[in-house]
Image (spheres, rainbow, N blue to C red):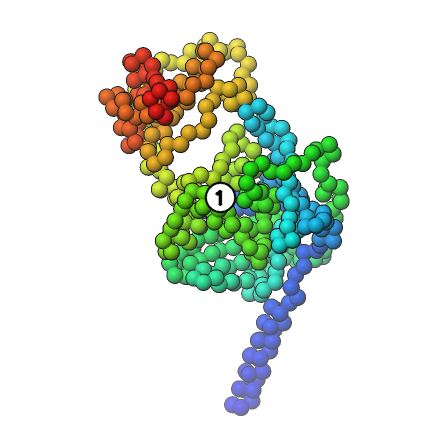
Amino acid sequence: MGTSWCWFGAALLSCFAGLESKFLTKVPSFGDIYHVAGILSLPYAEIEEPFEAWYNLSGRVSRIEFYHGQVVTLQHGFVKPAGVGYKISPETTETEINVIKCFQAKGTVKDPILPQSIFPSLEGFQPIKEEEYKGRLCTVWQHVVYEGKKKNTYTIWITNSSEGSIPIHYEMKGFNTLLGSHYDKYEIDYTDLQRIVDPSIFKLPAGLTCEEFPGPGVEHRMAVNPIQDFVSPEREDQSHHLFQHYKEKFDKDYDPDEHEFRKNIFVHNLRYIHSMNRANLTFKMEINHLADRTVDEVGPMRGRQRRTKPNNGRPFPAEHYESVLLPASMDWRLYGAVTPVKDQAVCGSCWSFGTTGAVEGALFLKTGNLISLSQQMLIDCSWGFGNNACDGGEEWRADEWVVENGGIFPAEAYGP
């Protein structure tokens, strides 16, 4: 009996020793010079953003491109005294379309511009298990950080090759232990890791002049290094500073229990806005007073109603334009046919803004005069045509009111 127990105890100790040797491995290193591609996924914002990154720690430089090069960011940490970050992207204004611009933001002694790794620092990470991820055997490393009632779990899947450790997948999950709910999640998938980089990739394009960002500088650091908040949790969150500025700018004041909730919503909306702008779409988004609101809260403000009743509009005479060669896109702002962006506040009256915008453009094409028309007049006066003011309406009903009444007043005469 004693011999059996001794054998069992020795076997158990051997098993534990095997586990210990299996997991007490050296912290992986991904190298000081590399090139890698991947996808940044933001599930709460429904974003999947492709990127490509180059990194040279000894040269104190990095380059990260987003959406297949639509936006290029460069981090030149070697520039004295505290580094410079650059953002290169096509910009469209009322006078220019898709003109390549370069903006720069300088680091400070307290907050220098450093070369940005696309991989997280593994300080504090511990190996927890081995498992397959997308067909590749990986060691899973994890780091759990508690911040008050928040539990942030950082996990990375790493495989080995003849060339060293290769990161495959990285994710962060934020859990509010008090409310029992997840408040954040993001993921990064890595592909095509290479450890040879052409140094010329870190140079600014020849002949391109870089200028300071226009306007206040709160978002500039995030613009020249969007990835920092996702892979550098040890550094102070850039979105935290921006949220403080947002509260001051829009005079926001929350109860203590509401503050964290609104901040989380703001961060997700901020990520969505910045990612959409990096995609170089036909429009640009900005933070406004609704950036701390959920989709459900903003929904009632939209106000466009959908009904089955025919809209009495004339059919478009498509046959008259069959031989016309149309451009792939048309930006009427460049021709002076669009009035500045307006604000419907908390009134569900988007239907009136759509109506006035269409009439303003048509009036400009007819007369050459751009006149801002009154949404308030439609809100006040088109009830008899089936619209419901701030509780919703339809553009064609507003159009019928304009036709029936012989026009609509300018905003200056009636009110916006």
Front-lying residue, 207 or 98: 207
Q: Dot 1 lies on which element?
A: helix
Q: Residue at x 37, y 56 (%)?
A: 257
- Outermost residue on the front side: it is 413
Q: Nearer the viewer, residue 28 or 368?
A: 368
List x then y, in percent, for residue 172: 52, 55
The quarter of the picture where residue 9 lies is: bottom right
Query: Foreground residue, 10 or 64?
Result: 64
- Other-residue count near label 1 (Cα within 10 Å), few / some / many at <14 / 14–19 / ≥20: many
- Pinpoint residue 302: horizontal percent, then vertical percent: 36, 33
Left or right of 370 in this view: 113:
right
Q: Name the residue beneath numbered marker 1.
A: 270
Against 364, residue 208 (above or below) is below
Q: Amino acid at mark 1?
A: Leu
Kindly identify the residue that appears in the image at 35 percent across and 38 percent down: 299
Picture coordinates of residue 241, whole percent (x, y): 51, 50
